[in-house]
Image: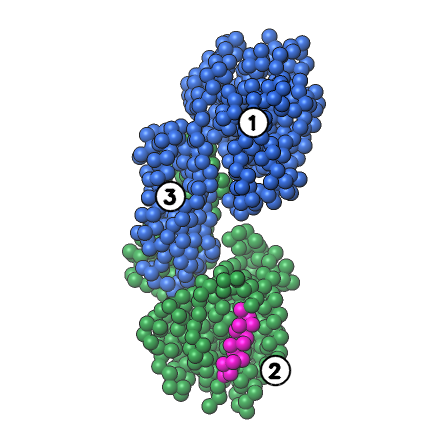
Chain colours: A green, B blue
Amino acid sequence: MLAVSLPRLKDRLLALARFGALPGGGVTRMCWSPPHEQARAWLLGELKTAGLTTWVDPAGNVFGGLGLPRVSIDAPVILTGSHIDTVPEGGILDGALGVIAGLECLHAIRESTTRPPRPLAVAAWSDEEGRYGSLFGSRAFCGRLDAAAIATMAAVDGDRLVDAMGRAGFDARRAPEAAAPRGSVAAYVELHIEQGARLEEAGLPIGVVDSIVGVRRTRVVFHGQADHAGTTPMERRRDAFLAAADYALKARDLVVGRGGGRAVTNVGVVHVHPGASNIVPGRAELVHEMRDPDPDVLERLARDCEALAGEVAAARGITVELRPLSATLPAPCAPRVQAAIEAACASLGLASQRLYSAAGHDAQNLAGVTDSGMIFIPSRGGRSHRVDEMSDWDAIERGANVLLHTLLRLAA
Amino acid sequence: MLAVSLPRLKDRLLALARFGALPGGGVTRMCWSPPHEQARAWLLGELKTAGLTTWVDPAGNVFGGLGLPRVSIDAPVILTGSHIDTVPEGGILDGALGVIAGLECLHAIRESTTRPPRPLAVAAWSDEEGRYGSLFGSRAFCGRLDAAAIATMAAVDGDRLVDAMGRAGFDARRAPEAAAPRGSVAAYVELHIEQGARLEEAGLPIGVVDSIVGVRRTRVVFHGQADHAGTTPMERRRDAFLAAADYALKARDLVVGRGGGRAVTNVGVVHVHPGASNIVPGRAELVHEMRDPDPDVLERLARDCEALAGEVAAARGITVELRPLSATLPAPCAPRVQAAIEAACASLGLASQRLYSAAGHDAQNLAGVTDSGMIFIPSRGGRSHRVDEMSDWDAIERGANVLLHTLLRLAA
């Protein structure tokens, strides 16, 4: 039975982990940054070494093809992939696993005598983590990019997408041209770490994703009044940071209390202006994120939080402004892909369970243009988006073999 | 009766306001930054134009002398001054007024037939606003600089003092050499805007400062756990930012509730790490500032806040670390200087009242080495440390004339 090479897979994962490596472990490799662009160049070399055809589209997505020169309607492709960008101070598997395992699957097939009837390809989607725009590359590939918004897309620190892509040699305005022809992708399946603790706690090696949560991000800006922090009487201050602090604590309680058990929320970005110890904060900005697998719950929570922000600001005599940053709809996975994963597991003697993904993934964009699905493997301690994110090497090998046999079934 | 020239004073204040000017008014001119260094060069030119001798000491303090080449024990000087650095997005008078009015007083005396028995000088103290270290220049001049701490002094964004001074052409390690010989300063008086609303509300043109508040700054660092903001269950998160938010709100209530009416507090610097919307904050840093004119109250509040930080962290299963950044003791002003100011007011027919300063000032360092005092003029709406900080031009003229006649009395 065809199988991946764990030594080769491991070597490549560790080689990729060197781009943007941090002294204490983990990586910071944000899309379009120098370490990311070096990793992209390295990946193109590995894809060629594996005997695959390679191409890069105008959204910066990198492809390696087996039996095809590029995505085309003439020979609909069975696609796998993930991403090689990371969050700041992230781990070495989030995204990297799906790309390197996909490459390994195609490498193993190419070296074998197996010749699948359909062409196969592996993709590394750009900016999955959404430094400049959530799931950017797969959104472009799936024709979901709003061309008019590209000029204003920017990172939380203000760095514009057009500048970041420009520095990496891309023209952001051309990114919508990455849209694949309708019907050119026959199916999509992505291997990823779970990033939670459900599989580990259940003692199961494989998760079959049945749906992916929607994620809403909103910039919440409190406008108070900058004043001297010594001479302004306490009762006259209109402190934007204290309002932001109040909102963050209450919004957390609101989402936990009214979210029905699956909703989660986070405030991970906070900026206080002008940012001096002796000045009362005149402006405080938060990025407030919420996730739920049910679109109605997400919509209701967003309305409740907007009302809450208004109440908090009014109670403190200041104003607040909410600017939507991104909103993805929860996405169901295709029954055909789930069935193929489960059949692959059965053929390998591996138990599995269905679960929803609490993280957003490129597979949710692919779900809009083809049958899309995901394979999860356990994360040690459920840890992810941190430098000690890891999975056991035998869990990685099992996941890669499930991906291999899922691809072969879908390509049959 | 000798008087300042308001047109010349106004021209120079507006000329200085151009260095680091912001499009919507106000200035950002932080010590050692390019706009500050340009302003320093301009000031040296103006001092020379006024016929004063000039020198710059190793702490970056700029002096203009009338009747002396530099500070010396042989001819104890009557000193005035303030600072030309500003907070970010600050006003055009905080500091600048005291320097430019001091220059104008010496210019007016030099042009007159008056020859005071004692030498006079005006100083622009470096980094009063404490970007790298609170009241840095006057601390160095008064021999209060901890030489061992210089290597580690840094701005809240991590920029080190040695690097900032190096870029401006100074060697930070030599700053302690700025210490003036004991007995070389006969008295110090500083003109400043009140930065509060007490004089305006009382309808009085002049405030005679009787004491200056102490200011304590502490870096409060909450250490939680960075985690994936989608997949980590809410009840397992150890969110450092929510702890910081909780602390900021409770510390404000503690200081207001237990501070005895005069204590004020501020959290003006907030940094959240790693700073991505999809990562639970693993670390959150605040700079917590407190002020009170009573050293015992300040000490008690600092202990209470430290206990509060520990309680907040423990309740959330995380840890907290408190690092003292700076602490100035409340400083009394010299009765002799207060009397000289009041006599000057009387000779000019101006009413005055005594008040304490709710802001820290270089005069508090000078109080350790000589008779030190301050003159306040009203601030419009009590506004300061903001771009619309301003005082009426006739209030500025009155304050400068009070400074002129106070200097003449002290130098008699």
Quarter of the figure with the N terminus of chain B: top right
Magenta residues? A4-17
Gap between marks 3 and 2 measured at Cα: 58 Å
Please report, as a chain letter, where disc 3 is located.
Answer: B
Residue at x 47%, y 75% (from the top left corner): A190
Residue at x 33%, y 55% (from the top left corner): B317
Residue A280 visible (yes or no) = no
Q: Amino acid at mark 3?
A: Ala
Residue designated by label 1? B82
Residue A9 is inside the magenta segment: yes
Q: Amino acid at mark 2?
A: Gly
Q: Residues within 10 Å of mark 2 (few under 14, many from 20)?
A: some
Which mark is nearer the camera, 3 or 1? 1
**In x, y percent, where is residue A229?**
44, 34
Residue designated by label 3? B248
Quarter of the figure with the C terminus of chain B: top right
Secondary structure of the residue carrying numbered label 2: loop
Residue designated by label 2? A51
Labels 3 and 1 within one chain: yes
Q: Amino acid at mark 1?
A: Ser
